[in-house]
Image (cartoon, rainbow, N blue to C red):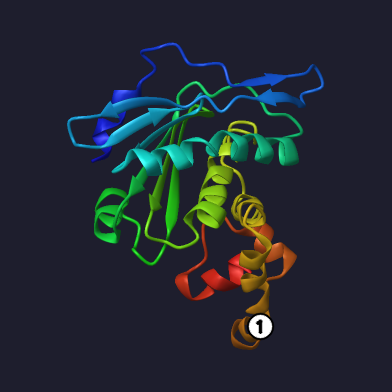
Amino acid sequence: LLTGGEMMNAQEKRPPMIEETRSGTVKHIKEALRHLGRDERGWHGAETENFSIFGSSKEEVERVGTTIEKIRSDVRLKWCKAVGSKWDTRCQVYLHPDGDQYTRASGIPKTISGGSVIMMDSGRVVRRTIHLRMVAHDIHDSVLPHEVTHTSMAGEFDGVYPPRWVDEGVAVLAEPKASRDRHTKQLPNLRKQHGLYTVEQIFGLKEYPESKYTQLFYS
């Protein structure tokens, strides 16, 4: 499934989308979405300046495509104080219509609504990929901003991956308040079960904690 991503490899000129002032703030954003039709697998494709989007329906692709650049810009303005230049290669975004296909393509369990993969080489991001399980009820309001935040923060830490606590903390903060509140409401029970992380422990995490501590980590 994922090997067809080369369909989007920047053969054509990218449409201009974002203009920045010298101070790095956004002057205006043009939601330029270019539909590319269906590929040999039956996937509808479209592209924006920084994203190539694949889905089973044109409507789903369009809905994601008309918001994803703004999410990226908002993330970068909030945390990096500038929109930043366009990426060398577009982030590939796959909108999976069901859990089985989602898991086969991404290796991510069906219980998780989205995931992103970042590949770096010699300190440079060479590939960004997002997988979304489109049957999730909060895919547009919560999961999409979360995963776009991961791809947007990649490459902003002097050629290394962001620390896990930064990467996930910032991504959770991109979710709506109701979603963030669900995490914090679990803290009292999680504290009774496991205790809380110390600052030293959080800062020292190189990888995600073992599964029984995952919810504590996100909260």
Residue holding disc 1: 191
Q: Nearer the viewer, residue 117 or 124?
A: 117
| Left or right: 116 in relation to 24 | left
How busy is the neighbourhood of tag 1: few (under 14 within 10 Å), some, or many (20 plus)? Answer: few
Q: Where's residue 73, x and y in %?
A: 65, 34
* Quadrant housing residue 27: top right
Is any part of residue 118 visible from this angle? Answer: no
- Residue 10 placement (x, y as % from top left): 39, 17
Residue at the image position 68 percent from the left and 63 percent from the top:
177
In the picture, which quadrant includes the N terminus?
A: top left
Above or below, comparing residue 47 to residue 68 in the picture: above
Instruction: Inspect this view and state whether residue 110 appears.
Output: yes
At x 39%, y 39%, the residue is 61
Which is nearer the eye, 61 or 51?
61
**Above or below, 169 relative to 191:** above
Q: Quadrant of residue 13?
A: top left
* Residue 149 horizontal/vertical position (percent): 59, 44
Residue farthest to the front? 59
Residue at the far left in the pictured view: 40
Along the viewing direction, whichever of 150 and 77 lies nearer the viewer: 77
Query: Which residue, as the protein is rendered here, is positioned at the far bottom?
Result: 192
User: Label 1's element?
Assistant: helix
Residue sitting at x 63%, y 69% = 219
